[in-house]
Image (cartoon, grey):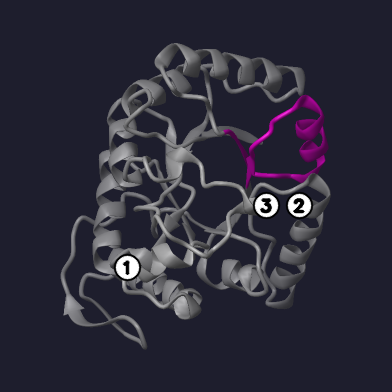
Amino acid sequence: MNIGIFTAVTDEQVRPAALARAIEERGFESLFVPEHSHIPVRRETPYVDGAEIPRDYYRNLDPFVTLTAAATATTHLRIGTAIALVPQRDPILLAKEAASLDLISDGRFELGVGTGWLREEIRNHGTDPVTRVALTRERLAAVKALWTSEQAEFHGRFVDFDPVYQWPKPVQRPHPPVWVGGWGPTTFRRIIADGDGWLAPPIAVDDLLRGVGELAAAADQVGLPTPPVTLLLTEPTEAAVEKLLPLGIYRILFGPLPVSDADTAVRALDSLCILARRAGMAPATV
């Protein structure tokens, strides 16, 4: 099982290059960061349990800029989005950004994607929240065409372009891993059809076990093996990690980190290293 870090990086916190170096130095396998382009001041979409949206949601840096800084400051740390909001991103630009980052990182980039939940944010990008799932699927298909074809073209309901040239192509073949986030009525079918694995949201271990079973059943229906699972563990404890070990999870992301300054981030990383060792899953020795 791989152990990575999930955290927002904002203008008020430690810079991404310094954070990435500290994560790699402690043997963690990966760094994944979230995305929100903005947060509308007035909204009707509720946040979890009716709470206020956290400050870092509207102060986080663009994930591709963050991960570029992280890539250039490290040598083997995997870097990824958790998640990139595909309904809010032009697919031609998304393909170029992701392929460029994969090139700069020497093939260490992973694309975690989602459809988004904040309807007002989605609308501000000219997208109807009602159609965001279908839009996401088309845009992902278009991105993959751009990644893998010398002359890429796509003709769909939401995305339509005649043959184009676009370089660079990703270093990883056929393309960087695509992790499909969320958990809804169509999530597992979309993981099988559109992705390489499930980016599971922060959920109880018992719920995760049920989700993995549903994912396995969906894969079995089409004669495929169960895709790998990356899990966000937002309240990491030794007991939680021990429960997850038998499930065969590909990657656990600890987080989010308190990264108000470099010293605080380092102390948090050191504590997570101790937690991992106690649970029998210490980060790899660098």
Is residue 88 in the magenta section? no
**Mark 2 vs 3, N-terminal side:** 3
Q: Position of residue 40 (x, y in %)?
A: 39, 57
The residue carrying mark 1 is 125
Single out the residue that lies furthest toward the left. Answer: 165
- Tell me the CA gap for discs 2 and 1: 32 Å
In this rendering, the answer to whether 94 lies above or below 9 is below
Question: For the residue carrying disc 2, how many other residues have a C-alpha within 10 Å: few (<14), some (14-19), or many (20+)?
Answer: some
Residue 250 falls inside the magenta stretch: yes
Query: CB atoms at circles 1 and 3 under 8 Å apart?
Result: no
Callout 2 touching callout 3 (CB < 8 Å): no
Instruction: Pick whichever, 215 or 39, lies toward us.
Output: 39
Q: Which residues are magenta?
A: 231-255
Query: Residue at left 83%, top 50%?
Result: 206
Report the amino acid beneath label 1.
His
Q: Nearer the viewer, mark 2 or mark 1?
A: 1
Q: Is residue 234 left or right of residue 142?
A: right
Q: Residues within 10 Å of mark 1 (few under 14, many from 20)?
A: few
Label 2 is placed on what type of residue? Leu
Quick one: SS at disc 3?
Answer: helix
Dot 1: element = loop
Q: Nearer the viewer, residue 180 or 267?
A: 267
* Residue 270 versus residue 168 in the image, above or below: above
What residue is disc 3 on? 49
